[in-house]
Image (cartoon, rainbow, N blue to C red):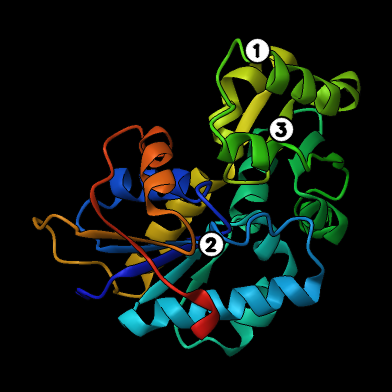
Amino acid sequence: MDSRPIGVFDSGLGGLTAVREIINRLPCEDIIYFGDTGRIPYGTRSRETILKYTHQDIRFLRTFDIKALLIACGTVSTAAMDELSAVSDIPIVGVVEASVRAAASLTRSGRVGLIGTTAAISSGAYERLLEKMLPDARIISRACPLLVPLVENGRFLRGDSVVETIAAEYLAPIRESGVDTLILGCTHYPLLADIISDIMGPQVKLVDAGAQAAAHLGLVLAQKGLCAAQGSKGAHSFYVSDSVSSFGEYASMYLKSPVPGSIEKIDIERY
């Protein structure tokens, strides 16, 4: 048994969808969450900038002696996962592998849709991994750069004509290609699941990257003997690089519950 916390980070609030799944699946685990709200979005940045931000985020989380790290950011998972895993002495879980495994098991036609940030899509990471798992499969992908800023500002509910119009435009070529599975390759996108499902139709299965990564994290902890003692209730702390009040206002929507812990602003540039 290991009582140390799990570290989770994202460029903003989207990673809270993964935190919600960790809390539901692993209620005994302590969680330290960092949302880099002052520098969002990551998905439009250069790889060099993404790596710089990522190393700062990890250095901050490691001040808490974390036992494992969940990268709840599709952009970082595609841009830096291999590099980070190669030098880390703790388990690191990203969203790409877990999402692709889920999509590979769900698709019947071999036609899989993918939406994500510009950086995540241009990396080709999802395509390469799916090709290994299902050589005959095909990913039809689309970068959706406007969705993260909209979700970060609370624009993700049915009936919001702005986000519905933009999502429909992004998804049109994927829907027309006849996919039967769609990977939501950014942890912000589950907040848009109702709108996306309305656009794609009930025949298309949605793969929640955050939920799949949280499930994979649980398996990794069990395999490595890192699970917390059963019967305890995990403690949760949240850190941001910008406004605490703004984070608190929207975080409960992502978590689907009141924020279960303290929120504190930190200067990420110090790390």
Can you identify the residue that label 2 sits on?
Answer: 36
- Closer to the camera, 96 or 161? 161
Q: Amino acid under label 1?
A: Pro
Q: Between tags 3 and 2, which lies in front?
A: 2
Q: Quadrant of the N terminus?
A: bottom left
In this rendering, is residue 56 above or below 133?
below
At x 75%, y 49%, the residue is: 117
Cα–Cα gap, marks 3 and 2: 27 Å
Image mark for residue 202: 1
Report crowding for label 1: few under 14, some 14 to 19, many 20 or more residues within 10 A (C-alpha): few
**Displayed quadrant of residue 56:** bottom right
In this rendering, is residue 68 above or below 236?
below
Cα–Cα gap, marks 3 and 1: 12 Å
Q: Earlier in the sequence, mark 2 or mark 1?
A: 2
Residue 120, x across and y down, in percent: 77, 55
Image mark for residue 19: none
At x 40%, y 42%, the residue is: 251
Q: Between tags 2 and 1, which lies in front?
A: 2
Q: Amino acid under label 3?
A: Leu
At x 59%, y 53%, the residue is: 98
Residue 51, x across and y down, in percent: 69, 76
Is residue 213 in sight in this rendering? yes
At x 48%, y 64%, the residue is: 241
Q: Amino acid under label 2?
A: Asp
Q: Earlier in the sequence, mark 3 or mark 2?
A: 2
